[in-house]
Image (tube, rainbow, N blue to C red):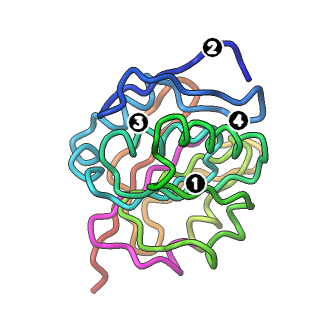
Amino acid sequence: MSQSHPRIVGGALAGRRLRSPANGTRPATAILRSAIFDRPEIRDLVEGACVLDLYAGAGYLGIEALSRGAATVDFVERNGPACAVIRRNLDGLDLSERARVHRLPVERCFSRIPLDPDLIFIDPPYRVDARPVIETLVERANFPEGAIAIWRRLMRASGGVPPPPEQIGGLVRIDQRRYGDGAIDTYRAEALT
């Protein structure tokens, strides 16, 4: 585990320390978490939400959602040490009853987890093209109208990763913001007519 201890930035557990994996993940910084959760559309949605944290890494986005009142979070992460850190954080913060940690590749999770989330975080390694995963999620999920998906990615397409589309099935991009070398694309589930 690294020597630095990031903290939860908002909600009932604001200020509480988080454990972090030694390596192999790219945890969302406090600045990035604040930028996501302080947006009105996220702030208004998270209370009571069912959240899906794909490529969860250290799990900071999902834990932040729990601190801010999310009903449940499903964390999906293939890295064993990262899953252990997520579980230790959940246990230490008394959040285990509201969360499930699934140690498996995101590509294999869709038959094993609830697919009716209100809020989805998609935070793959920068060299991974998340579009096929998002397309599969859109095909199989039963999004409530107004559900939001947050896709964190490298700002410039590299290594053959194409730029994100304006729409993926019933998910329509409503915002795009740059943070350092990365970008956050926000999609909302629209009613299909």
**Magenta-drawn stretch contains 144:** yes
Q: Which of marks 1 and 4 is in front?
A: 1
How far apart are the alpha carbons under marks 4 and 3? Answer: 22 Å
Dots 1, 3 in contact, CB < 8 A: no
At 74% across and 44% down in the image, what residue appears?
Answer: 127
Judged by depth in the image, the label closer to the viewer, 3 or 2, is: 2
Residue identifier under label 2: 4
Which quadrant would the C terminus be assigned to in this image?
Answer: bottom left
C-alpha separation, residue under disc 3 versus residue under disc 2: 27 Å
Amino acid at the residue labelled 2:
Ser
Element type at mark 3: strand
Residue most extreme to the top: 3
Number of other residues with Cα within 10 Å of mark 1, as a class: few under 14, some 14 to 19, many 20 or more:
many
Task: Give the secondary structure at mark 4.
Answer: loop
Please give the name of the residue rendered at 31% of the width and 73% of the height, measured from the top-left corner: 144
Left or right: 177 as drawn, with respect to 52? left
What whole-number distance in Å separates the C-alpha atoms at marks 2 and 1? 23 Å
Q: Where is residue 75 in the image (x, y as percent from the top left)?
A: 57, 54
Asked if 101 appears above or below 29 in the picture, the reply is: below
Residue hosting label 1? 75
Of labels 2 and 4, earlier in sequence is 2
Splitting the image into 4 quarters, where does residue 31 fall? top left
Q: Could you give the CA–CA distance between mark 1 and mark 4, rounded to whole angstroms?
A: 14 Å
Query: Does the magenta-highlighted stretch encompass residue 98?
Result: no
Give the image location of residue 152, x and y in percent. 53, 43
Looking at the rendered structure, the secondary structure element under dot 1 is strand
* Label 2 or label 1, whichever comes before in sequence order: 2
Q: From the image, tell me which residue sits under label 4.
A: 25
Task: Answer whether labels 3 and 2 touch (C-beta < 8 Å).
Answer: no
Q: Are marks 2 and 4 in contact (CB under 8 Å)?
A: no
Q: Is mark 2 on a helix, strand or loop?
A: loop
Numbered range of the magenta stretch? 137-154
